[in-house]
Amino acid sequence: MSNAVEIYVKYAGPVEVLARRVAEALELTWYFRSGRGFLSALEVERWIGEPTWAGLRVDPTESGHDNELLPEEWAFEEEPTADAPYDYQVGLDMRGPQEWIERLGRMVFDRLTGFDLPLAFVGENVDILADFLPGRGVREFPPGTSASEAGRAQWWEPRLHDDPAAPWRPEPPPPVAPPGRVTVFETGGLLQMVPLTEGSGGWRWIAPVTSIRVDGGARDIGLLLGSALTTTAPPERDDRAAIEEQLRRVPNAGIEDVADFGRRSVSVEVRSDGTAVAAIPHGPHRGAPDAPPSGSVIEELVRQESSADLDPAALGQLVLDLVAAVRERVPA
């Protein structure tokens, strides 16, 4: 039997940024665009000692910031609920006793308080277990406190519930191409974005890897790439093996190993210094791809653009155009 919990987040920025922040905070290897949100998986043993996995998703709520409706059209329920003011939900589900998912959910909730954003932790039976408000801290609720109108006396917070559509704080638009480096691999119509960081041994891959289909839309691809450029990782962490394992898991592709992945993939290395973007296309890789990739550079296709001339859709289209141009020369 599968059990689930939800952690609600009040955040006025795009889902691509929140998903990357969640993935980094939880030290995930990957997250994948699915519908209007993102999916991933959490190794439960590392958190609560139980040998299983939990599904993780980051989605806009029905009345959230990323909803296509205008704020005045949001359909809040007639009866207020504890989760009404929140823009996104981080959902966890797993097989096992309910105690496991609530222990795991509480550890994830505690980790996400580091975002300094309002949070609410709602359990399997739609009971609110805890919430967090910057400046006030964590508030615990007695067992059985309903997240619906019945529990209003316990969970009502005027700074959130008096005007649930109001943002907690303004979030400036994220930079289109902040300083950073990402290699975008294309295999079987799937784009996988691998961030890089420079250390004493040169450039190396870091997690999390984010993925989106080539038909996911230029704007969404650009937003995801811009967020991936800001990825950071502790200098002592080595994600190489986990990233290699993830890269070869292209659905329905039958890829045998990372060397087979390299032979069947093309890539675009995106380098940004905050003022200009260089997009460097590579052909297939001879053997396992290195970081930076070992596939030959296609010099005549290299592009350089001023960051001031790019918006997320243009950045995403730049990558799509280069992938298509390479694929014209090198069929999948």
Image (cartoon, rainbow, N blue to C red):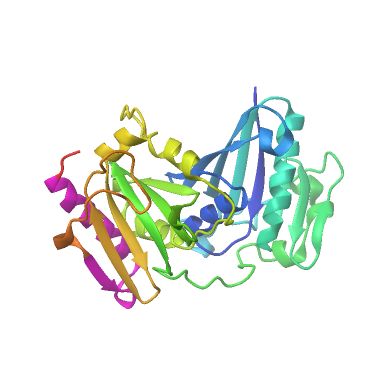
Left or right placement of residue 288 versus residue 80 in this view: left
**Measuring 40% from the left and 46% from the top, which residue is drawn there?**
211
Which quadrant is home to the N terminus? top right
Q: Is residue 321 magenta?
A: yes
Query: Compared to 83, does 280 lie above or below?
Result: below
x then y, percent, for residue 25: 61, 53
**Measuring 22% from the left and 51% from the top, which residue is drawn there?**
296
Query: Compared to 269, does 187 lie above or below?
Result: above
Q: 149 or 314: nearer the eye? A: 314
Residue positioned most to the top = 1
Q: 127 or 322: nearer the eye? A: 322
x then y, percent, for residue 229: 44, 61
x then y, percent, for residue 104: 71, 38
Which quadrant is home to the C terminus? top left
Prevailing secondary structure class for the magenta stretch in the rendered image: helix
Q: Which region is colored magenta?
A: 303-329
Q: Is residue 231 magenta?
A: no
